[in-house]
Amino acid sequence: MVAFHYPPCSGTSGVHRTLSFSRYLPRHGWRPIILTARPQAYESKDGGQLSQIPADAVVRPVFALDTRRHLSLRGRYLRVMALPDRWLSWWLGAVPAGLRLIRAHRPAIIWSTYPITTAHLIALTLHRLTGAPWIADFRDPMTDVDYPHDVSERRVYAWLERQVVRYAARLVFTTESTREIYLRRYPTLDPERAVVIPNGYEEDDFRALAAVPSPATASGPFRLLHSGTIYPEERDPLPLLRALARLNREGRLTAETLRMELRAPGNEEQYVSIIEGLGLAGVVQVLPAIPHRQALLDCAGASALLLLQGPSCNAQIPAKTYEYLRLGRAILALTPDASATAAVLDECGGATRVDPLDEDAIYTALPAFVRAVRAGAHPLPDPTATTRYARHTHAGQLAACFADVAPPPPGSVPTAPTGSGRLRSSGRPS
């Protein structure tokens, strides 16, 4: 498993996806070997998830540097040193380490996961050198008409994407919309090679939250929380903030009745400046990052949860969506009707949806949403519908994908080690 995002890395949903796969694949007959990066490559670290790594998992962190942080001179560096991304140096450490792991363990599958593009470059190299079958976890689209914005970067991404489509035995996406994009983009791509395994939530993360009551009807300001990154273009909060500024000036939603919290949104200085310029300093707060499980507890204590996803990302679903749904809190979702995010919210319920670019619609919907939640009249997510997004079920889907690509040897009989589920008799790890 070639994955840049793995504990102690933090601040990205990719950590949780790969960690959960490595935890649950042994139940389905696959033992993981994780080829990742040394901690100095990460901008943000959290040691809290290290205890969740399976005790018998082989984890090999290797040399990797961030070009911008480690190899620049006064913030400047050669562009070629950051193509396809700032962690190109990881390729230098990961390829020889990966070859040693392949010689030692004879893996049946190579699996790599985006959005650190170098992960697919490493897996491509290992696949071409060894012939081991390769499954590429795209998650979201790797390229678009104007993404990446840098032309040189987009050309490298496009080249690597073509190599993945050519050589990977399976391409895994997190939404059906993204899968359809790739089937249209590559007409010769066999639909059987394109698989959807969605993002989700880790059930163990919620066990400690079972007794947390809903604070929606509590006294004091209504607390509307957004947890995680707010991309200025893809999740533009300006229409929301402008609508809230109008409501605040009219005395309809003030600091006494509403507190909107943006937890670890990124671009903090930019957002603080916007908030102050709109006169919302007492209503909207920008808060620092906290460890993942603490962040979930923070969400559980909110009156309602805020979700942002603009039209440029209609094929994608923010990973936090599934955790929001599992928390069972009312959701204010600023996302277009045509988006994949809207589809999963409609499936599971519990959300008020508004066009994220329609300031007037937000202006009308926000007070009504607060009133409905306060009164206990707003619907909540359906736990039965949400259950299908538990990550342990997704590990079973990935294991089935593995078995299609590398079936067990004829006549082999799986064995069942204590507490680990079934393992292949051939002993070959993934």
Image: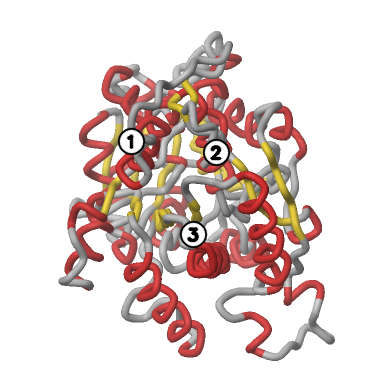
On the image, numbered disc 1 is attached to which residue?
A: 400
Instruction: Give the image location of residue 328, x and y in percent.
Output: 40, 22
Residue 346's place in the image compared with 313, above or below, is above
Give the crowd class for mark 2: few <14, some 14-19, many >=20 residues within 10 Å. many
Instruction: Name the secondary structure under disc 2.
Output: loop
**Residue at the image position 38 percent from the left and 30 percent from the top:** 396
Q: CA distance from mark 3 to mark 1?
A: 20 Å
User: Is the residue 417 above or below the residue 75 in the image?
Assistant: above
| Residue 122 visible to the viewer | yes
Quarter of image, res 383: top left
Q: In this figure, what is the number of numbered marks?
A: 3
Q: Is residue 397 above or below residue 273?
A: above
Q: Secondary structure at mark 1?
A: helix
Which residue is labeled 2 in the image?
429
Circle nearer the N terminus (3, 1):
3
Which is nearer the N-term, disc 3 or disc 2?
3
Question: Taking 403 as reference, is 27 left or right?
Answer: right
Q: Is residue 281 visible?
A: no
Q: Position of residue 20 (x, y in %)?
A: 53, 34
Mark linked to residue 114: 3
Mark 3 and mark 2: span between their CA atoms? 21 Å
N-terminal label among 2 and 1:
1
